[in-house]
Structures are given as structure tokens and as C-alpha cells.
Amino acid sequence: MADRHCSAFAPGRVNVIGEHTDYNRGLALPFAIAQGVTVKAEELTAGPDGAASVEAIACDLQESDRFSLADPAPAAGWRAFVRGAVAELSAAGMPLVGARLEISGDLPRGAGLSSSAALSIALCLALAELASHTGRGPRELPLERIEIARICSRIEHHWTGAQTGLLDQLASLYGAPDAALLIDFRTLEIDAVPLDLGGWRFAVEDSGERHAHAASGYNERRRECAHACELLGVESLREARPEQLASLPEPEQRRATHVLSENERVLQAVAALRAREPQALGRLMNDSHGSLRDLFEVSTPAVEATVQRLLRAGASGARLLGGGFGGAVLALLGPGVPNPPGAIVLRPGPGARLTG
């Protein structure tokens, strides 16, 4: 082993509102959370033949992987992210070195808290920092944050088959304490929106149903939105006008209607936060969930049961998180409402960073 080492942390995210809008060049309002993924990296010396390799250990799963640095062949599960990170960083011109990686975290996989984006970001930060090894500060990253986001998006596209947008990556990379991020995916402009809730709080409860973007209807929904754009003659649904949607067939009309109305709800949510009106935010969350359920059709019976359970427990608003088809449900709880059994209170935290 060599003595070069580093570690990186990338948080998961909660999206207050704005689902399935990122790949439609729309608006979203996520925030980074305290939970995430840590990758510890140590340079691994080349073997007797001079070939460098990467050894990865998923500590929580007690599983490992080893492959040639020069030839990261495709793999399944968490191994796809490790191999994809090596391949995409190399393709971006990063001169990587052999590495031993230890992966750990406290984000539940498949729960809609963006464990996959946190994993890919932490991997890319650790591998890139190990290669450059300049001893920079925690907020000084080895690559520009937007470049890291795009590399991690390519990992998901090319190595796991999930045609995701940039929401999860940008939320994890640009997260700020006590703030949500208003992201415009047409311009990639990001504005911090203070989360001054005055005793109100966000909580998530797992529906108990795992989801996987590539295996679910996520890619199908993305194709339907793209088809709606073709029929309307626009580059993205952000350019579509409400009066145009009546010309669309189903299910494209429902999909497009959700996207346009969800963009408007994001703006209304920002206004509610700035006006310190959490009750209005709760109503918008409920409206968002209804649209995701009825127009985008990404809910499930397990998710619906969780939403209703949280509302009965006193939540002002509750909605599914992430791409849908399972995962966690986000709830907004007032000052006098006890935490529902099984729900975890989440608070915004800083974005991805080097930790040592």
C-alpha cells in the first residue's frame, strides 16, 4: 500500500417539491440531508506485472469487488457504480491511480433519498482527489461541481440503465445548511431558499417497497415526456403552453399536464417558504402527490397507504419522493404534531465534501 489516502462524503437529498421536472428542463426544490455515503480511498500499488487495479469493499453489505483500472467491465448492483465512476472519470481525462475503496453509509437504498447519486458522487470525489492529492480543503473539490454532476449522471445512464436527470446530483453537491435549492434545469441556475419553518419539520417514512429506476417505469415516463415534446414541436416540456396540451394523446397529455403544473407548484412553494406560510406548503405537497398519482401514475398501494397513515397522524402535507414506484414518503409536520411511528425527521445540511 502507498501512503496516499483521502475520504469523501456525499449526502442524500429530499425533494420538497418538483418531481419528474428535471429531465423536462423544469424547476425543483430539493435540499441535502445529513445522511449520506462515505468513501475512504487509499492508493493501491500496482501488481508484479505493473497493472493497476481497484479494490472496492461495501462495508454495510460485506461484499467486495476487484477489477483492472484500465478495463472496468460492466457489473450489477453497487459494483456498477464503482466501475462506472472509474470509467467515466477516465473518459473525462482524469489520470486515476489504483485504489482501495471502503464504502459505508446510513442512507437506505431504494427509499427515494438518492442513495445512488450519493454513492456515485462520493466515489468520484474520492477517486479524483486520490489522483490529484493536493491536500485541498473540504469545500475545494478536485473537479467543478457541475462537471461532477454530469459525470455522475453518465454513470447512471451508461452503467446502471437509469435515464435520470441532474436533480439528485445537484442537490447533493450544492446543498447548504438550513436552505433548500431552487434549481432551474433549463439554465442550471441554483438559488438558496431559506428553510425557516418556525418549529415545523420534514420527516420521511419508508413505504417498505423498494424501487429501482431502471427496473421501474421511470425510463418509460421519460420516453413519454420526450414523445409529448416531439408531438408539440418543442425541445422540452418547459417550452410547452397549457393550451397546447389538449392536442396530445394519452398518456402523453397527463404526463405533460403534471410537469407544467408541478413547475408552477415549485414557484408557489418558494413563495410560501419566503412568506413563512408552512400550511400553504403542506397543501402544495398534497397537490403534488395527487398529480404524481393520477397524472404521472408513479404511486403504488404501499406508498398510498403510507401517505394516508402520515396524514391521519397529523401531517399537513405528504407526498411520494423521488421517481416513484415505491420508496419513501415525505411529510410536513406542525409544531404540535408528534413524530409518527417509523418516521425520521430530516434537516437540511451541507453538500458533498472531502472529509480527510
Image (cartoon, rainbow, N blue to C red):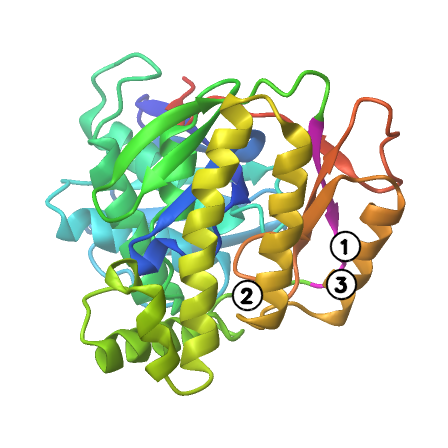
Q: Nearer the viewer, mark 2 or mark 1?
A: 1
Q: Which residue is mark 3?
A: 304
Residue 134 figure quarter: top left
Q: Which residue is mark 1?
A: 307
Vertical order, 349 against 205 (above or below): above
Residue 250, image x, y percentages: 45, 86
Say which mark, if any, is on residue 128: none
At a point 59% along the width and 42% down the height, the residue shown is 59
Report the magenta stretch's main SS. Answer: strand
Give the mark nearest the N terminus, 3 or 2: 2
Which residue is the extreme one toward the front? 243
Vertical order, 331 against 277 (above or below): below
At label 2, counting other C-alpha atoms closer than 10 Å, the crowd grade (few under 14, some 14-19, many 20 or more) is many
Q: Is residue 309 left or right of residue 118?
A: right
At a point 26% along the width and 14% down the height, the residue shown is 135
Residue 85, image x, y percentages: 31, 50
Which residue is the extreme one toward the bottom? 249
Residue 320, image x, y percentages: 64, 55
Q: Which residue is mark 2?
A: 212
Distance (Cα) linking label 3 and label 2: 18 Å
Q: Which residues are magenta?
A: 201-209
